[in-house]
Amino acid sequence: MDPNSPMFQNTPQQPMSLQRSVDDRIDRERTAKKEKDDEKKKQEDEKILQLEKKLEEFQENARFIGDLASNFQTKYQDALNGRIYTLIRGLQDLDRMKGTFSDKNVPLDILPYLDDGKNPLLYSKHCMEKTLEKNKAVNGKIEMYKKFRAHLIKEFSEEMPDFVIEYRKERGQ
């Protein structure tokens, strides 16, 4: 067999072309996944924008109904009825939209912040502060248990040294 024959010359090229095709396929898969993720994010953003729009419309209708009702005159009855109908239709739209947000969880503790007109980020700040406090408390307990364990082993080693030696062998200390 001649090393210069076409059979030997094509052998190194086949793995290279195979590797290129595998790399190309991986690149295409990555690109497709990225495009799919981008499309999903775009759809999520669109759903949120629709919800914001519906909530703003609902709020505006409720405000307008309040104005009409507080200064009610019979000549505004048709306008009031129309706004009430629009408000009901908006509530129905929101009810239909709720299924698209079933995967979202909103903590109920945030509602008092919103009711008081506070920024929802204050809720996040308070949650972080509570978490830090709990973390400090837990770390303090961990330290106390470590000290207790060390003290316990010290006391056991004075009273039952053989037991402590066996314990440390078992624990690999």
Image (spheres, helix red, strand yellow):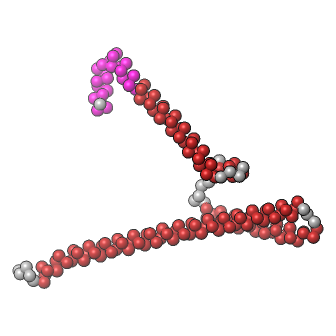
Q: Where residue 115 sits: x, y (%)?
A: 72, 51
Q: Is residue 169 magenta?
A: yes
**Left or right: 80 as drawn, with respect to 54:** right
Left or right: where does residue 98 sit relative to residue 20?
Answer: right
Residue at point 28% right, 75% down?
Answer: 20
Residue 96 shows in the view: no
Tell me the quarter of the picture where residue 160 sits: top left
As drawn, the residue found furthest toward the top would be 159
Does residue 110 appear in this view? Answer: yes
Residue at 14% across, 80% down = 9
In the picture, the quarter occupied by the N terminus is: bottom left
Q: Residue at x 61, y 51 (%)?
A: 121
The stretch of residues the image draws in magenta is: 149-172
> Is 110 included in the stretch rendered in magenta?
no
Is 10 on the left-hand or right-hand side of 19?
left
Q: Residue at x 54, y 38 (%)?
A: 134
Q: State the residue lying farthest toward the right.
A: 74
Question: In terms of image quadrants, where is residue 64?
Answer: bottom right
